[in-house]
Image: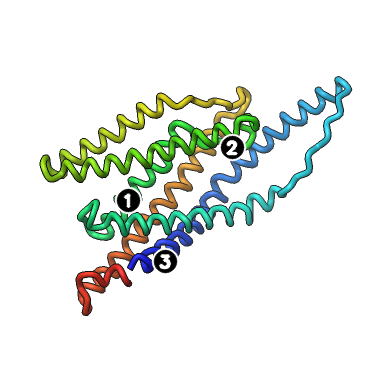
Amino acid sequence: MVRALLIRGMLVGLLAGLLVFAFGKFFGEPQVDRAISFETALDEAKAKAQEAKGIHVEEMPELVSRPVQAGWGLFTGVMVYSTAFGGLFALVFASAHRRAVDLSPRATSALLATVGFVSVYVIPNLKYPANPPSVGDPDTIGIRTALYFSMLGLSVAAIVLASTLRKRLAARYGEWTATLTAIAFYLVAMIVLGSILPAINEVPQAFPAVVLWRFRVASFGMQLVMWTTLGLIFGALTERAWLKGRTGARPTSSWTTA
């Protein structure tokens, strides 16, 4: 049964990847091109200043051309990312449905997509937002990556603890009170943890604010497209299989094997 859900999740992830690629190609890549133009202008200005001082700077060869990055590179990265998340989404669904939450397959899928979007993307990016090329010191990329994944791991851990807390409180205080308490616990935990982790601001003063804003909006949109597709399409397909199974010979479990 888990195998069927996993395959379904990866197939929906493939569909999500196609939609995310189209969105990123149309909305995200123009901002990347503008950021690269800004970076190129800075590099040329530095090179001229060094040449004026008699310092010769060798130009680094381009390992991957820009058309490849914006085409097959983007497509491959997005498809692998979305398919992997589709599989993980299906596995979490298999663990949560009728256990952590007692909802229909479609409602469970929509709820998991919402929680995943908030905990995996929104909260970590509020602390360490996505940046286009030319933003960030190359010497600090290691520490910046470590801090981002630390924030991501803490967010996921906090959402798991909040879910466990809600389940334990529900029997005594009711679903509504338990849910509000779990949400409050998660928000307070992330505010405290976010204030402890160091802030990073390496945006050049001359970098166009509009380009930075549009790049981050495009990044937000790509994630929103992926999680929305996973939540709605996976939920619809799974509920359809569940309803079909209820009218068949094995009404209690055949929805998970369809």
* Image quadrant assignment for residue 122: top left
Instruction: Work out whether mark 3 precedes mark 2 in sequence or the reverse, and give the earlier one.
Output: 3
Type of amino acid under label 1: Leu
* Image quadrant assignment for residue 118: top left
Residue at figure coordinates x 77%, y 26% from the top left:
46
Q: Position of residue 249 (x, y in %)?
A: 21, 79
Can see residue 214? Answer: no
Residue ID for mark 3: 7
Which callout, 2 or 1, points to the residue nearer the camera?
1
Q: Position of residue 81 (x, y in %)?
A: 51, 53
What is the spatial separation of the Cα atoms under label 3 and label 2, in whole angstroms?
34 Å
| Number of marks in the rendered image | 3
What is the spatial separation of the Cα atoms under label 3 and label 1, in whole angstroms?
18 Å
Q: Position of residue 117 (x, y in %)?
A: 39, 45
Residue ID for mark 2: 132
Q: Residue furthest left?
A: 172
Q: Nearer the viewer, residue 28 or 58?
A: 58
Residue 171 appears left or right of 159: left
Type of amino acid under label 2: Pro
Give the class, few, some or many, for how many residues have Cα within 10 Å of label 1's Cα (few <14, many ≥20): many
Location of the N terminus (image quadrant): bottom left
Residue 112 numbered tag: 1
Residue at figure coordinates x 30%, y 35% from the top left:
186
Residue at figure coordinates x 71%, y 49% from the top left:
64
